[in-house]
Image (spheres, rainbow, N blue to C red):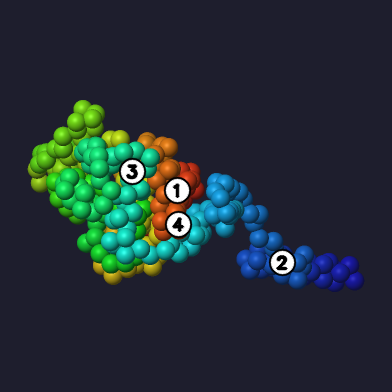
Amino acid sequence: MHKLSSSRAAARRVLLTAALMLSACSGGSDIGGPVPPPPNTCTTVPPVVAGGYYDAARSRCGAALLATVHQIIRGQRVLDYTSARDSLYLFIDRGNQPFIVDLYTGRAVPSVTTRATAAANSINTEHVWPRSRGAENEPGLSDLHHLFSSDETANSQRSNFPFGVVRGTVLWTSTSPQTPGDVSRLGYSNGNSGQIVFEPRPSKRGDIARALLYFYTRYNTQRPSGYSVANFAFERDLIIAWAREDAPDAWERARNDAVQRAQGNRNPYIDWPELLTLIPEFPLN
């Protein structure tokens, strides 16, 4: 009788062990109930912006945060390209100054308020995400968050080359009447046979980086015709470093406000620089 009871006890122990192993593998069993999910450790707190603009991003991080930010910024009012340039010269790039300062050379140009006065002063509109890489059609064509007033010659030199650091042969250098040394350059990234890159002047690298990150976040999920990450794949790590090194200043924040008045959405990388840490990856697929 003792041997029989021992056998039954041993059998029960085997069955209990098997049940516990099954529970561990499958996420739960009738013994002890289902295994609870891990606690939510994402404590993201968005910046305070009027109207609770970023509230939907609370407690999200990583890929979920990137997707949420896309949803927040995607519904901008689409301007036609003529209206966008009128706004750019009249108030977006002027602010409260009596002049505009072009993106690549730093040339201060008074009396530019229209497309006609811009053209008369050799100023046109730069798409920092090139038109040939996905900004040829609306809404990217007229999206003011990546449009900037630019010296015509500098804009032509930039063409659609990726941004980078010139470490090889220099093909072109801007002049800088305001700040010597704060120049843009076109040249080879390595020697004289590597990738040709456009290196923007140091004081505007953060602005350009945040404009590119905005465009990627806004359009990468719903890609317009002709969209390509060919440049972004080359630039990505460098522009993240530029964005960290050159924090948003008062002028850039005011410009973000002005763009929101014109088209209704904001650049989150200006409002929320910590996104670069909270979103550790910007996938290329």
Residue 117 image position (x, y, % from top left): 21, 49
Q: Mark 4 points at which residue?
A: 265
Q: Is mark 1 on a helix, strand or loop?
A: helix
Mark 1 vs mark 2, CA separation in Å: 49 Å
Residue 34: numbered disc: 2
User: Is residue 46 depicted above or below 107 in this figure?
Assistant: below
Q: Residues within 10 Å of mark 4 (few under 14, many from 20)?
A: many
Which residue has dot 3 on it?
94
**Of the image marks 1 and 2, the number of the one nearer the N terminus:** 2
Between residue 247 and residue 252, name the one nearer to us. Answer: 252
The span from disc 2 to disc 3 (Cα, nearest Å) is 61 Å
* Mark 4 → mark 2, Cα distance in angstroms: 44 Å
Residue type at tag 1? Asp
**N-terminal-most mark, 4 or 3:** 3
Numbered-mark total: 4
Residue drawn at the location 16% of the way across and 48% of the way down: 120
Frontmost residue, 73 versus 24: 73
**Secondary element type, mark 3:** loop
Q: Distance between the residues labelled 1 and 3?
A: 13 Å
* Disc 2 residue type (three-letter): Pro
Instruction: Give the CA distance from mark 4 to mark 3.
Output: 19 Å
Of the numbered discs 2 and 3, the one sitting upstream in the chain is 2
Q: Where's the N terminus, which quadrant? A: bottom right
Q: Crowding near pointer 3: few (<14 within 10 Å), some, many (20+)?
A: many
Q: Nearer the viewer, mark 1 or mark 3?
A: 3
Q: How far apart are marks 1 and 4 (CA)?
A: 9 Å
Q: Which residue lies furthest to the top in this view?
A: 180
- Determine crowd level at label 2: few under 14, some 14-19, many 20+ residues with C-alpha closer than 10 A: few
